[in-house]
Image (cartoon, helix red, strand yellow):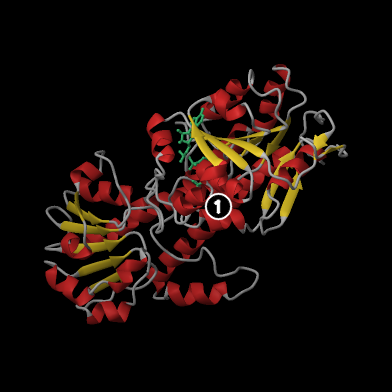
């Protein structure tokens, strides 16, 4: 490295630091191409690796799944994320893939930890994969400038990793928390044009070095202590989950009182203090982050003796939301046994093939438990041969999915659903009942198409 210079290494302000950590100086100056090893070739690791390559860095992505690495080496992407395939292709000179820890770390200056942190039975985050990476680094990382955790982890994880690195003789290797806020479906754009980049470090020099990796990214950088950075991620997701749940609660009150949630939400969203985002009433939030991270924050609070009551209510209401929809459908049809119900959209949101914690799974399971037959359509989802999907019938077109159905439930607001020939679809159904679980379609148009139209937060409109 030629561009080295002494950087001030003042400790960052912290409410909970065990002790400030100072990596050996001088550190290389930021704002130049770096050599980055990314651990985890999932949604976050691949987007991170490809975007860092796009920014000019040389990146090696390591995963433990041989088939995933084979696929990536052959130029394929193991899941659907808009723009990611093109980005990987465009940067193939600077991007490589490996199963081997040593190959990944050997020439790297920084290791990014982007492995999954799924929930355990207690709701706490399972950090076993993070620790597997930290353990693998103990013998391989002495030349690194920094280890950066991007995976979503409980507050205090950085402190523990710091201790582990110190105990392995890696005092000179910096540590940073750099949580990720990208949303699946727009992850590439979110990474390159973020609302903010959050960097938590034990010392100023590491924070500035990591910040340098983001040179060229169009967004503000917030630098802070490690614990606060870890908390930003959990708190931001909990607040988004709360906003969705709040509007779903208002929608339920609208249904009971005759107000229309669409008018209510639109007018609320005009208030600049509130903003229009995350005010769409629907079947509840899902995905790999909001359910997991709200439960992890609740568990973390409970573990420290504080019952996070608001979050308890948010989680409970969200779990009820798809069940309430089934209850309404059941009342409208006078029972579900023997009924055929078509589910339109299975992924937790449009623009992704991710089905983790998708409300569709609860809806399908409830329908099957009530004795209904379930057909489904989704343009991207590839559910494996697991329950409830192995008990449902998949169709490639909406027309086929709704044929002879007693009801259709729009679960995911895929834009192609707007363009379906709904009058023709209504004619194919045994009983043209439509439950718009995302309030995507225009109620009058659906009535004109021949449906009884149910939606969230609005009165049922009978044809
Ligand atoms: N998916 C999102 O939208 C999102 C957004 C923000 C933050 N996050 C967080 O980012 C982290 C990763 O999420 P994801 O959705 O990318 O998960 P993922 O399950 O899609 O990918 C994780 C990858 O890590 C690999 N892995 C596991 N152990 C490994 C090891 N020891 N070495 C190398 N690779 C290993 C797995 O094989 C898998 O390919 C999680 O903590 C998640 O909460 C996710």
Mark 1 residue CB less than 8 A from any atom of ligand 1: yes
**230 vs 57, nearest the viewer:** 57
Give residue 436's position: percent from left, percent from top.
32, 67
The image quarter in which residue 93 lies: top right
Quadrant where the N terminus is found in the figure: top right
The image quarter in which residue 168 lies: top right
**94 vs 316, nearest the viewer:** 94
> Residue at 56% across / 45% down in the picture?
48
Give residue 275's position: percent from left, percent from top.
59, 69
Number of numbered labels in the structure image: 1
Is 399 rendered above or below residue 216? below
Q: How many other residues sit within 10 Å of disc 1, few (<14), some (14-19) or many (≥20)?
A: many
Is 275 rendered above or below residue 116? below
Is 198 rendered above or below residue 148? below
Residue behind mark 1:
182
Give residue 343's position: percent from left, percent from top.
25, 57
| Residue 252 shown left or right of residue 364 in the figure | right
> Residue at 51% across / 63% down in the picture?
278
SS category of the residue bearing label 1 = loop
């Amino acid at each position: 490295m030629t561009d080295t210079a002494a950087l001030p290494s003042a400790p960052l302000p912290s409410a909970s630091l065990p002790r400030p950590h100072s990596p050996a100086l001088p550190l290389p100056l930021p704002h130049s191409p770096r050599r980055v090893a990314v651990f985890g070739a999932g949604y976050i690791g691949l987007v991170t690796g490809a975007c860092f390559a796009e920014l000019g860095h040389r990146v090696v992505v390591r995963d433990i799944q041989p088939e995933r690495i084979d696929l990536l080496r052959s130029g394929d992407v193991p899941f659907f994320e808009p723009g990611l395939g093109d980005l990987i292709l465009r940067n193939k000179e600077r991007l490589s893939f490996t199963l081997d820890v040593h190959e990944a770390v050997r020439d790297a200056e920084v290791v990014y930890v982007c492995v999954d942190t799924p929930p355990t039975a207690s709701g706490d985050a399972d950090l076993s994969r993070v620790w597997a990476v930290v353990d693998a680094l103990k013998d391989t990382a002495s030349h690194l400038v920094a280890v950066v955790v991007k995976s979503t982890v409980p507050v205090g994880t950085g402190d523990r990793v710091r201790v582990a690195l110190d105990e392995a003789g890696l005092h000179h290797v910096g540590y940073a928390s750099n949580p990720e806020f990208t949303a699946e479906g727009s992850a590439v754009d979110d990474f390159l044009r973020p609302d903010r980049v959050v960097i938590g470090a034990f010392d100023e020099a590491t924070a500035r070095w990591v910040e340098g990796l983001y040179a060229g990214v169009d967004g503000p950088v917030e630098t802070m202590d490690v614990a606060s950075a870890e908390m930003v991620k959990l708190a931001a997701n909990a607040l988004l989950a709360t906003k969705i749940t709040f509007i779903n609660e208002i929608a339920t009150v609208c249904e009971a009182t005759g107000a229309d949630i669409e008018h209510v939400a639109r007018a609320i969203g005009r208030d600049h203090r509130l903003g229009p985002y995350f005010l769409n009433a629907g079947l509840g939030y899902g995905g790999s982050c909001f359910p997991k991270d709200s439960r992890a924050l609740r568990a973390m609070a409970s573990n420290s003796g504080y019952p996070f009551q608001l979050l308890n209510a948010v989680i409970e209401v969200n779990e009820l939301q798809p069940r309430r929809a089934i209850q309404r459908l059941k009342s409208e049809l006078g029972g579900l046994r023997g009924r055929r119900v078509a589910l339109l959209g299975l992924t937790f949101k449009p623009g992704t093939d991710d089905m983790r914690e998708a409300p569709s799974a609860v809806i399908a399971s409830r329908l099957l438990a009530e004795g209904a037959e379930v057909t489904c359509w989704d343009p991207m989802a590839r559910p494996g041969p697991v329950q409830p999907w192995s008990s449902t019938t998949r169709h490639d077109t909406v027309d086929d999915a709704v044929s002879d159905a007693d009801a259709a439930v729009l679960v995911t607001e895929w834009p192609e659903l707007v363009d379906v020939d709904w009058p023709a679809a209504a004619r194919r159904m045994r009983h043209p009942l439509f439950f718009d679980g995302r309030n995507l379609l225009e109620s009058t148009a659906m009535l004109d198409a021949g449906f009884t139209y149910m939606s969230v937060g609005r009165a049922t409109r009978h044809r």
